[in-house]
Amino acid sequence: MKAAVFHGPEEGLRVEEWPTPEPGPGEVMIRVAACGVCHTDLHYLDHGTPTFKAPPLVLGHEVSGTVVRLGEGVEGFAEGAHVLVAAVWSCGRCAACRSGRENICERGVMPGNHTDGGYAEYMVAPARDIFPLPEGVPLVEGAIIADALTTPYHAVARRGAVQPGDRVVVIGCGGVGLNVVQTAVALGGRVVAVDLSADKLERARALGATAVLNPGEVERLDRAVRELTEGGADVAFEVVGRASTQEQALACLRTGGRLVLVGYSPETMGLNAGRVMFRELSVVGSLGCPPIDYPRVIELVRQGRLEVKSMVTHRFPLEAIDDAFAVLRAGEAVRAVVTP
């Protein structure tokens, strides 16, 4: 089969012939319809972040496709079925898994990191970690549900616990941030979207944000948010991954508010512990999404309450995967997908 193989940051990706995988017991072989192009992969390519499995390795962890073969003992799937592959495969046995927090599994396996992923014509995945895509959910655009939509859902519904009427501020309206916006809206939040890009702010407004702010056009972001939210946000989501914007997000909260850190940053943010204590603020991280919530997100897409078609702004054949990453680096895509 053809695959875009990662040979290390110095060599990047090469589209070449690669062994076609065969499903083992409990596994399913999938013909890849689409694989989302994610900043995680960009970290491997551009920033020297090591993959768990040493190169050569097929990257890509946001996959939809069609079942072509079932491994021994697999039930509940038929050849030709449309499916979504979870972005992390949990062990089901560790303390985190047994407490319902499979997204932080101690032995989690990420396709495109621990094992070959979806920038290929075919891949295999454990049957327990794939989910049917019902009629009404587009197969190609549906690939982004695997990470770009489930990750925001977990952040909003579980870690942020957004309730109807909550005042919500979302700082950073890239692909994940825009999905935080639309998920918070779907769960009843009143959203203020924050970004430096006028185009992204317009997209946020189209997805239901009640107000938008460009921090470059206001004297102090926290004051502007307080004016729009009658005293501050109940929940703030930082989806940029910078210490400075994390601190801004914290400053936007009302007393008793919650800050959810979605963007990854190696920097250390400044935190006034006395302020956190006296105003009873909460600061939590959010990583991925446990598999129990994948069917819920898929159903929200099927019902039309969460949008995927308009979120996929660029599509590339496998042979043009370098162009897909060029678009990602330039910030031109809400979400791009590769279609092997």
Image: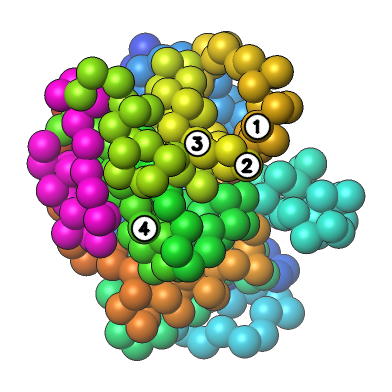
Q: Residues within 10 Å of mark 3 (few under 14, many from 20)?
A: many
Q: Earlier in the sequence, mark 2 or mark 4?
A: 4
Choose mark 1 or mark 4, whichever is in front. 1
Query: What is the CA distance from the residue labelled 3 to the residue labelled 1?
Result: 10 Å
In the image, the segment drawn in magenta is 198-217
Tell me where residue 58 appears, x and y as whole percent.
Answer: 45, 40
The circle on residue 279 is 1
Mark 1 to mark 4 CA distance (whole Å): 22 Å
Mark 2 Cα shell of 10 Å, populated few (<14), some (14-19), many (≥20): some
Against 176, residue 20 (above or below) is: below
Residue 253 numbered mark, or none: 3
Give the mark nearer the N terminus: 1 vs 4: 4
> In terms of sequence position, does the residue under pointer 2 or pointer 1 come before the other?
2
User: How packed is label 1: few (under 14 Cα within 10 Å), some, or many (20 or more)?
Assistant: some
Number of residues whose C-alpha sits closer than 10 Å to that of mark 4, classed few (under 14), some (14–19) or many (20 or more): many
Determine the CA span between mark 2 and mark 1.
Answer: 6 Å
Residue 190's label in the rendered image is: 4
Mark 3 and mark 4 lie on one chain; the one further toward the N terminus is 4
Towards the viewer: 275 or 194 = 275
